[in-house]
Image (cartoon, rainbow, N blue to C red):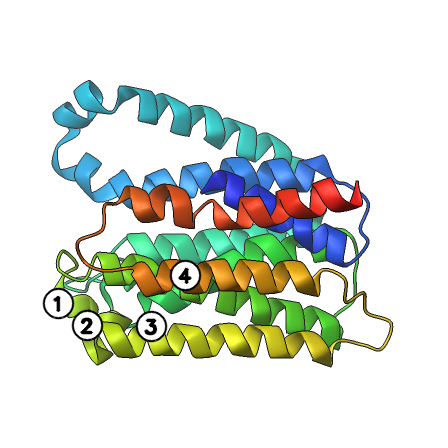
């Protein structure tokens, strides 16, 4: 997950010809580790602290180290970039913690989880590096944000299909609402939209990476096609999450 964030930030910098900024990448990398572990283990930690200390001590230590590293690199960012980071962090808290009495957290609000997750990833992997590089808001920034939102949205669809039998019915995930087959059709359609948006960039846009986007979209479509409730968690936790990393490596090997 953290490597995926690192890769997506790197690709944003590449698409907008931004000079390498390790601080932004490092903040995204370590922040993703903290955020992921916080979301995944928060409820369990609050309900069973003793078990957490015995069985997940390394994860806690990793989270503490990543939190310190994330804060260190956070301080190196520009103030406006820090503001974006704080906004994403607030979304993460809203997603995880029940702020209102007798109310579920945003993660359990009907049908909203996938939108919050996708929005957080757009904030971290698109908006944050562009603002830190003082790139103004243009139609190209909007297009990349929409494409990145679609990319994460479709990847989350794969997770939701595999977890359809274990997710709380109150979550009202997309597969729970419209069924697995219609969810796959929705994913295919969104991937087509993602590719078509590439042709709306400004006239001087470099279309060479389009080939890589076609390869990546095709790979995601294949994972989506073979996704089902009987698949192992490794199907998503490794293979699906690795897609952005492979995309980034293709760009690195070809253009560097």
Q: Which SS class for mark 1?
A: helix
Q: Earlier in the sequence, mark 4 or mark 1?
A: 1
Residue 156 is at least partly visible in this image: no
Give the structural element (helix, strand or loop) at label 3: helix
Mark 3 lies on residue: 184
Q: Give the crowd class for mark 2: few <14, some 14-19, many >=20 residues within 10 Å.
A: many
Residue 177 horizontal side relative to residue 10, left or right: left
Query: Circle 2 is placed at which residue position?
Result: 176
Lower position in the chain sequence, tag 4 or tag 3: 3
Left or right, 249 with respect to 239, comes to: right
Mark nearest the camera among 4 and 1 is 4
Is label 2 or label 1 in front? 2
Q: Are marks 2 and 1 in contact (CB under 8 Å)?
A: yes
Give me the C-alpha separation between circle 2 and circle 3. Answer: 12 Å
**Badge 4: few (under 14), some or many (20 or more) residues near its Cα, within 10 Å?**
few
Quarter holding the C terminus?
Answer: top right
Residue occupied by mark 4: 222
Q: Earlier in the sequence, mark 1 or mark 3?
A: 1
Q: Which mark is residue 169?
A: 1
Counting from the top left corner in percent of width and height, residue 109 is at 24, 68
């Amino acid at each position: 997950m953290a490597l995926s964030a690192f890769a997506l930030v790197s690709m944003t910098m590449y698409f907008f010809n931004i000079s390498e900024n390790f601080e932004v990448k490092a903040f995204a990398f370590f922040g993703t580790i903290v955020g992921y572990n916080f979301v995944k283990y928060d409820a369990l930690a609050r309900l069973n602290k003793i078990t957490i200390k015995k069985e997940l001590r390394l994860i806690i230590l990793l989270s503490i180290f990543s939190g310190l590293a994330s804060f260190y690199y956070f301080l190196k960012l520009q103030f406006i970039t820090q503001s974006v980071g704080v906004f994403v962090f607030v979304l993460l808290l809203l997603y995880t913690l029940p702020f209102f009495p007798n109310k579920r957290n945003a993660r359990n609000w009907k049908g909203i989880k996938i939108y919050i997750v996708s929005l957080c990833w757009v904030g971290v992997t698109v908006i944050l590096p562009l603002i830190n590089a003082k790139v103004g808001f243009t139609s190209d920034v909007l297009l990349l944000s929409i494409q990145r939102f679609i990319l994460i949205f479709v990847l989350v669809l794969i997770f939701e299909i595999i977890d359809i039998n274990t997710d709380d019915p109150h979550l009202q995930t997309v597969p729970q609402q419209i069924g697995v087959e219609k969810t796959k059709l929705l994913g295919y359609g969104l991937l087509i939209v993602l590719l078509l948006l590439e042709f709306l960039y400004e006239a001087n846009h470099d279309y060479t990476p389009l080939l890589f986007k076609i390869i990546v979209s095709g790979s995601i479509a294949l994972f989506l096609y073979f996704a089902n409730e009987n698949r192992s968690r490794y199907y998503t936790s490794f293979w699906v999450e690795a897609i952005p990393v492979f995309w980034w490596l293709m760009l690195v090997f070809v253009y560097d």
